Image (spheres, rainbow, N blue to C red):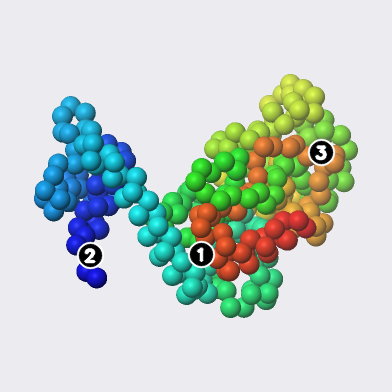
Amino acid sequence: MSRRLPSLNALRAFEAVARHLSFARAAEELHVTPAAVSQLVKQLEAHLDMSLFKRGKVLALSSSASAALPLIAEAFDRLERAVEQLRIDNDSGTLVVSAPPAFAARWLIPRLDDFQTLHPDIEIRLLATRRVIDFALEDVDVAVRFGSGVYPGLFSERLMQETIVPVAAPSLAASIHHPADLLKCTLLQDDAYEWDPAFPDWETWLATLNVPVKLPLRIRHFGDVNLVVQAATAGLGVALAWHTLVVDELGSGRLIPLFDTMLPTDRAYHLVTLNHRQSLPKVRAFRDWLQAQAAR
């Protein structure tokens, strides 16, 4: 049976304009010009021989368009799920993972060989970026995000809660017995605190231990966490670090935690993906493996 349907592009343009009640915002969403969106809507109106919008100072839907919009939106949702089902049935062996650069370099990559041993049929393609990727626009299967865990419209599960710990090389740690001893040390500062309010500067952290700062601190600044960790491992000073990003150095003894003091934060690493992708076999395998690694 042949179906006399209008252009899907025209229907998509109408659905976007109707949802936003704006040609400009619909064009932004669809990555075309407002003129192109307007032309597609006019094509649909010509096909239906009716007006879909009341055009005036404020754009409004006609009564017929308002009644049809939920059905059209549902149809696009169902179409998207159907296409995704085709992908599931023909599941590619490549898994595209987005993660923050420091987490990718310091925690994820050293453990990936274990995943590849367990799942030799799944190839990991790692995208290391601080940018929050848009699953609707980018070819990414899962992301590891650092934050509060509130990601509307996405599936999210917590991997590891993060804490902040002061660390030093064993040779330097041996001479530090009390928090006040830090006032005489070179303090290594990861300038991450400038973009993440959960990360304290040294004065703020010392205040949590009731250590008054009367003289200027001797602070050496770095713009990358890897440089901070390398400097601390080389014995150049004491560093404040995200615990997850130095867990391997702590485990090997190259760095020593000071004073058994960890500062809790409300930040955690989360695995995030589209709701309908969480059951993909390759995503499920990666989720299970990540949770097992995080539990260690």
Q: CA distance from mark 3 to mark 2?
A: 69 Å
Q: Which sits in the foreground, 74 or 291?
A: 74
Report the quarter where the C terminus lies: bottom right
Residue at 65% from the left image edge and 45% from the top image edge: 268
Badge nearest the viewer, 1 or 3: 1
Q: Quadrant of residue 55?
A: top left
157 displayed left or right of 25: right
Residue 191 visible at all: no
Disc 3: which residue: 261
222 displayed left or right of 88: right
Q: Alpha-carbon neighbours of circle 1 within 10 Å: few (<14), some, or many (≥20)? A: some
Residue at 70% from the left image edge and 45% from the top image edge: 161
Question: Residue 201 location, x and y as percent?
Answer: 65, 33
Residue at 51% from the left image edge and 58% from the top image edge: 276
194 displayed left or right of 17: right
Badge nearest the viewer, 2 or 1: 2
Sequence-wise, the earlier of marks 2 and 1 is 2
Sequence-wise, the earlier of marks 1 and 3 is 1
**Disc sitting over residue 105 in the figure:** none
Q: CA distance from mark 2 to mark 1?
A: 37 Å
Q: Amino acid at mark 1?
A: Val
Question: Residue 38 location, x and y as percent?
Answer: 16, 45
Tags 3 and 2 touching, CB below 8 Å: no
Q: CA distance from mark 1 to mark 3?
A: 37 Å
Disc 1: which residue: 96
Q: Quadrant of residue 54?
A: top left
Q: Amino acid at mark 2?
A: Arg
Q: Which sits in the foreground, 97 or 166?
A: 97
Sequence-wise, the earlier of marks 3 and 2 is 2
Q: Which sits in the foreground, 25 or 43?
A: 43
Tags 1 and 3 touching, CB below 8 Å: no
**Disc sitting over residue 3 in the figure:** 2
